[in-house]
Image (cartoon, rainbow, N blue to C red):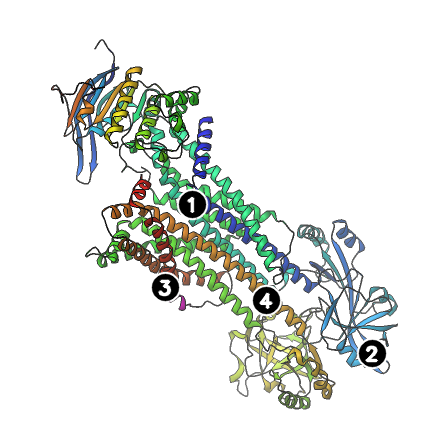
Amino acid sequence: MNATPSMIETTSLIKKVNTSEGSLQILQPISFSVNAGQTVAIIGASGSGKSTLLGLLAGLDEVSGGEIFLDGQPLHDMDEEARARLRGEKVGFIFQSFMLVQSLTALENIMLPAEIAGLSDPKGRAEKIIAQVGLEHRAHHFPNQLSGGEQQRVAIARAFITEPKILFADEPTGNLDSANSQKVEDLLFSMNADLKTTLILVTHDDELASRCQRQLRMHAGELSEVTEPLKAVAGGQ
Amino acid sequence: MGLSFSLAWRLFKHEARRGELTIILLAIVLSVTSVLSLSLFSERLQQALTDRSAEFIAADSQLRSRTPVPTEWIEEAKARGLNTAFQISTRSMVFAGDELALSDLRAVDDAYPLKGLVKLTDTPFGQGFETQEKPQPGNVWIDSRLIQLLGVEIGDLIEVGDASLRVDKILSEIPDGGFSVFNTDPMLLMSDADIQTTNLTGAGSRVSYKHYFTGDAGDIEGYYDWLRPKLDREIHRWQSIEDDESPIGQSVQRAEEFFLLASLLAIILAAVSIAVAAQRFSQRHFDPVAIMKTLGASKETVRQIYLIQICFITLLGILLGITIGYVLQEAVVALLADSVPVSLNTWYWRPLGIAAFTGITCALLFSLYPLMQLFSVPPLRVLRKDIDATLSSRALQFVFSGSAVFLLMLFYSGDLKISAILFASGIALVLSLIGMTYLLIMLGRKLGSGGMGAWTLAWARIRRRAMGNSVQLISFAITIMLLLVVLVMRNDMVQQWRDQLPEGTPNYFLANVTESQKQGLVASFDRNNIEYEKFYPVARGRFVSINDESIRTEITKEDEDPADDGRQGLGREANLTWSTVLQYGNEIKEGQWHDNWQEGEPTPISIEEEVAERLDINMGDVLTFNVGSEQIVATVTSIRKIDWQTLQPNFFFVLHPKAMENFQATYITSFHLDVDRKSEISALMAPFASVTLFDVDARIDQIREIIDQVSLAVEFILILVLVAGGLVLIAQVQASMDERLQELAILRTLGLKGSRIRFSVINEFLIIGVVAGLMAALSNEFSLWLLQTNVFQMPPSLHMEYWGIAPIAGAIVVGLLGALGCWRLLSLNTGTLLRKMV
């Protein structure tokens, strides 16, 4: 056992899907662990299985074999209801397509996880955090009234409102231009640092990946540690 | 629960404000509005028509009795809050100097009539006008025929029994005067205060006592329940308007069935639109549900949020629907008030309840399956947009929607039979439609392969969304079919009503025409250009026995009760006619019509089926009549069904002319004289003083007026259903347009010309319209056949014209709506289109 507790620990994790030509294994047995507070990038080409792995690690999908422990809890043994409870308590999410509820305002979107988790004063928390992402003047706007960058900042605020132990980010800057990407990245990493959240970031952007402490590469369903530096990028904040 | 409620409320509030709930709200509003306005209107109309038909018995209910009725029975009615009136009637000779005539005496109290009005006329056989007055003691009102027979004028005294009474006014009509070509004596209306002095009601006289009742239907029913055990079938007879089998009664009843049908169809239309809208609502919420689940919301929370939201939507829809429905119906009533008899200023809870129930049932049961789909959306959708709901069971959807429709039908009609027929045929329809749709789509596959033309694109789209399109096709087809059914039923029904009383329907009947007068009358009619009907020979016979068993009971009670209408026909005294030609409106049900009778065979007689049933007369039975001092013996060789809805003289017994060779016949006939030639009648009939003349103009006008009003009301209902159907079509096109959004955006982005996209979409809708129209025409025939034979008791008919009209109309309407929807989408620039997709 490590001195630092593992936030994620997988053993021989596999995923199979049924296709018209029979069962297809899209994740080869994967075993790795992520320490609490660590920032990890999973990189790889489209279709390599990054998002599948993310879905399993976050408890959005069911494993076909192997084990996953999230903060010591056996995700592989839980049903959807238990996983949902765990997600509500410990997990935050940021998606490429923002995934805001279109018919809720920016503020209400941010409040949503706090409400679901039953935290006290979700509105007060949301107001505080929306100011942190610099969007207090857009609090009552609906997602379609916000720019992509703004929407992703709302999503970041929503992800952090419950102060999750672990944050999953799926191509968080994939839909943004470079100026907005930079802003969002900075925000993500600074808030993450403040709250000491474990970050699992899926991306095919090496530059973004290099801002994480650790990089894992996904290739044809196999995960491997990246030992070589990805690019000569040293933070650059 | 608090979280679910506040989230549901927030979602509802924002979505309503942002117009995202418009379609589903509109669908609920539409269902509630159409059901409320339809049922409220038809309830009011029915009430008005019932009131109208109540006029024919001058009350809501009548108690007839051959002996005076115990006073406590009437006291009880009054105690129950019923209005009562009284009439005593008998037949007696009245005298004026040397002239005398048998007349139908009616002595009434001040309350009579409770429904309808007495009509007077200024000159004999003149146009009648309504009056509120009643004959005062000492006075009588006598009808034109009695004036003619007695040769009296206003102010003259006539003797009625022991009383000497003054002729005060000329009576034109009383509401419950009845109508019979046979045995109707001229009428005399007097005050019941004078009946004692006439001494006509003593022992041995044949008197009929009539008590009239009006009041709340429930009160009357309660009273009848109280009264029923006390009634003696031999003496008493209870009559309500529901028992009315006259042409008017039947027309009203059929109209009510039509309203019921129209409303049921409106409910189904509304249900279809809700089903479409709920499906769309559910699909729009796949993402939010996936997000909430990802963020840790439990299934239960998601379920609560959306069920509460649907409740909010339903509630708002019902409130809006009720308001709009009420205003709409109020407006229509105001517009039609002059031409259609609707009872105003009444509020009925039943329609309100039905409308609300429809809204709730439709909204909940039809959204149940889409919601269950919604609940099943996995959280993984946040990562993979292509993941849809995991629940997919069409069977479940059919079960939910099917039970919703059936429940509504049953609740609305309260009639298991009609509901079951409509429902079963509906299921058969949907199944065959699904089969046909697949077949057509498969066929189209062959047609639609080739280059990238507008037609190819259209077929390609139809093919690719086979299931979605089959649902869409079915809903278009059902909508068009329902509209066709309502349209055709209305046409057939109105036509049948009009056929009952075509222009030139005889408005005068003549009876007691002798052989010699017959020639004179025919000559006179021809000379004066008057259309007349056949002369039917009539002989009064006394029905003596069936197969040597003598008859004790009377065939009808007409002898005691002159107020019965012609339907009742004859008493133990039977009017016999003879002919070898089967009368119009008669149909042989059993045996053979006696036009081939051969000398030497027993004398044949044809008998009407209901009399045959009542008297238990069967084929081959031997009937004996006394005519004068002679006896006629005839064998039943046929049993006829008579269409009582034609205003023709009809006969229970028709003999072969051979049997009547030796008897002196009198004739009855009828003719038509335009209202503006009414003044000629006296001169026309003067040479034939002994012939009895009946003026039935007023009666015919009354029937025609009611038929016109009912037709107009039916027309209104048709328009309402058409509007509802139109809205459903729009909702469907709108919903399917959204599904096309993505494809349009992509095609547009790829640089396909707007005109080609437009054409392809229009073509797609044209194809769907034609196919839906064709399927609608086919299923229309099936449903109509079921309805006509099982519900409306009408002869079934084919409607070939709609085989052409339906596909063309379908193509035009659906194509046009598609074009409009598409225009709106294509007027957006590509950027907006792409944004809308997200």
What residue span does the magenta drawing correspond to? B792-806
| Residue at the spot of label 3 | B808
Q: Which mark is residue B153?
A: 2
Q: SS at mark 2? A: loop
SS at badge 3: helix
Q: Chain of mark 3?
A: B
| Residue where numbered disc 1 is placed | B23
> Dot 1: few (<14), some (14–19), or many (≥20) neighbours within 10 Å?
many
Is residue A56 magenta-colored?
no
What amino acid type should be assigned to the residue bearing mark 2? Glu
Nearer to us of marks 3 and 2 is 3
Task: Please identify the quarter of the rendering in which residue B8 is found.
Answer: top left
Q: Residue B824: x, y in percent?
A: 36, 50
Marks 3, 2 in one chain: yes
Earlier-in-chain disc, 4 versus 2: 2
Q: Closer to the camera, B590 or A197?
A: A197
User: Residue at the location (61% across, 55% down)?
Assistant: B44
Q: Amino acid at mark 1?
A: Ile
Say which element carries label 4: helix
In this orientation, does residue B749 appear? Answer: yes
Q: Nearer the viewer, mark 4 or mark 1?
A: 1
| Distance (Cα) linking label 2 and label 1 | 73 Å
Pointer 4 and pointer 1 on the same chain: yes
Tell me the subunit letter for badge 1.
Answer: B
Which element carries disc 1, helix, strand or loop?
helix
Identify whether B811 is placed above or below B160.
Answer: above
